[in-house]
Amino acid sequence: MNPTVAPFPAARLRRTRQSGAIRALVRENSLSPQDFIWPVFVRDGVGVEEPVASMPGVVRRSVDLIGDAALEAASLGIPAICIFPYIDQSLKTADCAGAWDPDNLSNRATRAIKDAAPDMVVMTDVALDPYNINGHDGFVVDGEIINDATVEALVKMTLAQADAGADIIGPSDMMDGRIGAMRRALETAGHQNVMILSYAAKYASAFYGPFRDAVGASGALTGDKSTYQMDPGNSDEALRLVQRDLSEGADMVMIKPGMPYLDICRRVKDTFGAPTFAYQVSGEYAMIQAGAQNGWIDGQRVMLESLMAFKRAGCDGVLTYFAPQAARLLNG
Ligand code: PBG
């Protein structure tokens, strides 16, 4: 598009900003609770709601409380929840077998949500890190994160999640070839309607810090994830990854983190036109909450402005820890 503007004073661009009603009329993008996927942390125990210190307002819930959270989300108009398990350090292993246990925390939470709120869309995370003794998303052999054996494990994990009732599988591991392998396995197992939202362009980011606290992976992680997650200096590579994942059968794609990577969101949407999501990650959430708690920024306004930015950048929706808070505000 090449916008033409009449010379002043024929054009006074302030005319369409003169009142709230006119601004509403010409607003190009909108934000609604329907745009949100709400990431939640689950843990073991009964009746437990434990605050995550580095993410004020976010809790880890025991599985028995997750149904109520889902009902609350549904009543606010939030269509989807994404489950992340907090696994006790003593239960992490090198073979990561908990990842494909049909009764692991994540799969129990999926069933609890579906029991309480059958229409709630359940998304699950596919990566080995919550179960891995060394905190990596894949198996580690001689200090190397090995690809193909990890993909086999991720396929087992995917099938267990689909069997538990997950609607959307979210591979966040960044191994090569996993989308095709997962798609084939789902088709073969009769899960042809289960969707894959690929974490296609996932950067090796320091913005994940508070999340690793929330899932108990910070202590565990040896080294960093830069042999599989993307270099923050790259942009064309994101397009190649998205293209690759779509060609292997991803139904939707994600860019992560969100706000520092809005340029990637726009390029991905413009290039492929596929359903595109961004993940406003834990560090982004923590920064806004910290600024607000100190009285340095207006937390509510910054929250809504940050979420609108994703829509403006071309995203169809956003994974955000703010989902219930933002939905409450948007619903008035
Ligand atoms: C791990 C995973 C991470 C997040 C989602 N899945 C962290 C990581 O890659 O270390 C980050 C989410 C957030 O920071 O909010 N597979």
Image (spheres, rainbow, N blue to C red):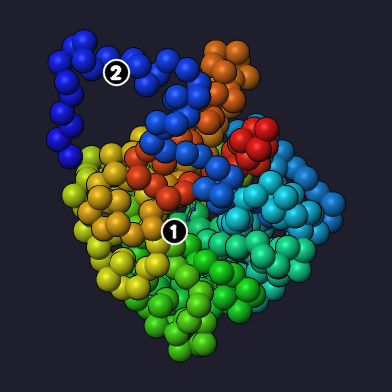
- Figure check: 100 above or below 22: below
- Figure check: 105 above or below 30: below
Amino acid type at circle 1 is Ser
* Mark number displayed over residue 12: none
- Tell me the crowding category of disc 2: few under 14, some 14 to 19, or many 20 or more residues within 10 angstroms, Cα based: few
- Figure check: 131 above or below 316: below
Judged left or right of residue 278, residue 92 is right
Residue ID for mark 1 = 172
**Mark 1: is the Cβ under 8 angstroms from ligand 1?**
yes
Determine if residue 211 is in view: no
Q: What element carries label 1?
A: loop
- Figure check: 71 above or below 318: below
Q: Is mark 2 on a helix, strand or loop?
A: helix
Measured as percent of width and height from the top left, residue 192 is found at: 48, 82
Closer to us: 289 or 88: 289
| Residue at image location 56% in from the left, 69% down from the top | 167
The CA span between labels 2 and 1 is: 44 Å
Considering every residue shown, the one lying at the far front of the view is: 10
* Mark number displayed over residue 13: 2
Closer to us: 321 or 175: 321
In the figure, residue 84 lies in which quadrant?
bottom right
- Tell me the crowding category of disc 1: few under 14, some 14 to 19, or many 20 or more residues within 10 angstroms, Cα based: many
Mark 2 or mark 1: which comes first in sequence?
2
Judged left or right of residue 300, residue 6 is left
User: Which quarter shows the C terminus?
Assistant: top right
